[in-house]
Image (cartoon, coloured by chain):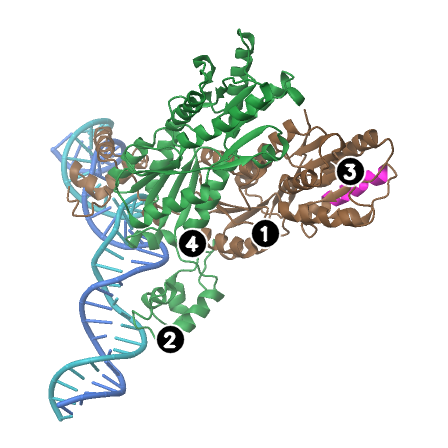
Chain colours: A green, B brown, C blue, D cyan
Amino acid sequence: MNRDKRQKRTTIYDLAELAGTSASAVSAVLNGNWKKRRIGSQLAERITKLAEEQGYAVNMQASLLRREKSKIIGMIVPKYDNRYFGSIVETFETMARERGLFPIITCTGRDPELEIEAAREMLSYQVEWIISTGATDPDRVTDLCAAAGVRSLNLDLPGSKAPSVISDNFTGSRELTRRVLVNYERKLGRKSPLLFIGGRGSDHNTSERIKGFVAAHVEKGIDVDAHHILACGYAPEKAEHALEALQTEEGGVPMGMFVNSTISLEGVMRWIIRSGHNGPMAPTLGCFDWDPFVALLCDDIEMVRQDVPAMLASVFDIIETGSATASLVQIPPVFVTSR
Amino acid sequence: MNRDKRQKRTTIYDLAELAGTSASAVSAVLNGNWKKRRIGSQLAERITKLAEEQGYAVNMQASLLRREKSKIIGMIVPKYDNRYFGSIVETFETMARERGLFPIITCTGRDPELEIEAAREMLSYQVEWIISTGATDPDRVTDLCAAAGVRSLNLDLPGSKAPSVISDNFTGSRELTRRVLVNYERKLGRKSPLLFIGGRGSDHNTSERIKGFVAAHVEKGIDVDAHHILACGYAPEKAEHALEALQTEEGGVPMGMFVNSTISLEGVMRWIIRSGHNGPMAPTLGCFDWDPFVALLCDDIEMVRQDVPAMLASVFDIIETGSATASLVQIPPVFVTSR
DNA sequence: CGACTTTGCTCAATCGATGGAGCAACAATT
DNA sequence: AATTGTTGCTCCATCGATTGAGCAAAGTCG
């Protein structure tokens, strides 16, 4: 009632006064342990009704300050511009909520400094866990968390100091390469090596995928050209420029490619179209990642879809069992042939 | 030092003890107004160093409990599965941070109940603003906010009780329809009406787009078939099924379409391929939304790209000026022709 | 040298919710 | 009737940071 000028939010003290009872009774009723605190059911009902009428909402800041567990879980994610991370975030939110956790998510654009800053901010909010997704330097986040007594976990890209859940990049990549090699041979009428493009050579996933890429070539007795492994970064322009540069070199651009992410694929597609390599002479493609429009619109592409639900199930499994070891869980991805 | 068993986080009291000073001095130094509070610069330096060494991070819960403004800003978003919302979220985060605000984002999957629940939860966290993006029932969120003295704002879909920032759907749709009609006439050799598919007839954007769609037909003297306006919802399957159903009817499916969102376009593409309408006989398309792969891979499509940076600039403009009226800002979208 | 200002810091109340401890009132038991 | 148990509630310290008020010491001025 006494809501002065800039009406302050209703508190348990306001409700207590209105109900003619104490703040602790109100608190007990509203947070559900009024049975344990032996509050009568009539009073409970009266308070509940009042709270509803007044549009009361707990002040989480006050509540969390007092409680021991915050139930807040943070996730750091590089971008929202592709289906993979989009579905990670969406699944993460849903699963966190199902478990009574409050998810907070921050996008850092693959900038290591921003990753640290975001982690520090999350620690200020008393998160209980930080999930570093596709982080450039996950171990630094883990160190920061450890200093604050907070658990952390790596998703998509592994770290050495916290449990990590990633796709089985080597096996996935080897199988993808096999399939593309078959398609390429069928088209070309002879065996020929593929071009590898996209990703960062320094990151674990890219290097494992390169290993799988090479292994599949070796199996088939095809020599890989080291010149044709272009871990040029993820951004579309990088892939596009790398192909432009290669075009001017001797031998030009192979018409069979392993593209390391849909982001890079965007650049590859741009190059294909700008250089007139579309239509019947389009390259044979493989992409380590999935996009619905590519799957529908591209004729000759094999895609690997990372198993996001399985990955996040594994993440929450680790959270629930509280396993502390810097284990590495590898989730097999799923294969999708276009059309 | 006295960090017991489960090491608690370092607090200003710990730092005060270590520095042989008071908690209020520590607080003043660490939150930057030590000049105003006349703390000596040597002590300030000593405290800063100590805080760094101990890996101190403020307890936001405690800090926010005491302060008047939380600097937290919430956003409710339907999905993360397309470029439009992805870029809204990414831009929102960046712009919020640039302004010293802490963004929290929740995805509600277009479920009105979840929207309300999410808003309630955000209010518990003392958000200062809630941005309802593409919300099914934004006015209910506004009411909830108003009761708590919190400002709200609608993005993408307008509401009647809070300022709204949306695309100029009518003009955008009319222009898109004009372009597709031209392409369709060129292909067909005669004037013919388009099919409208996707979206919810009950939402403002869809109904405005239908108006623009009709207006463009009227301009050209083409009769629209009311049977061919299918606001069947956003999900891909809905669009796919709607086309399947139409196929069996007399007249079949027109080979010129206005698709209301990339999500629906996914279903349309599936239908096109499954029903064998791809290749040279593919339909002439227009899509109110943009996706890079569609732009690159589709031959005969016109797309409208909603101007996300301009929309969010307008959002933060309203937030900064604090305008209270339930105004409607319409941002012109940008046209993209494939290839 | 005494009055006054400035500097540099500390004290203690406060934000709102929580939960251990405790206190009446009444019921049940011996 | 005295003791013990149960029910239904209230009191108050507490979480950590913030901030108005206040106090001692040093500096300034006439």
Per the model, the C-alpha gap separating discs 2 and 1 is 36 Å
Q: CA distance from mark 1 to mark 4?
A: 24 Å
Q: Chain of mark 3?
A: B
How would you rate the neighbour count of disc 4 (Cα within 10 Å): few for under 14, some for 14-19, many for 20 or more?
few
Residue located beneath label 1 in the image: B138
Residue at the spot 57% in from the left edge and 36% down from the top edge: B83
Circles 2 and 4 on the same subunit: yes
Q: Are marks 1 and 4 in contact (CB under 8 Å)?
A: no
- What number is the disc on residue A140? none
Q: Secondary structure at mark 2?
A: helix
Instruction: Tell me the quarter of the image containing the C terminus of chain B.
Output: top right
Amino acid type assigned to the residue bearing label 3 in the image: Met
Q: Which residue has dot 4 on it?
A: A98
- Is there a contact, CB below 8 Å, between mark 2 and mark 1? no
Q: Nearer the viewer, mark 2 or mark 3?
A: 3
Foreground pick, B156 / A256: A256
Give how far across and how far down residue A197 sits, in percent.
49, 21
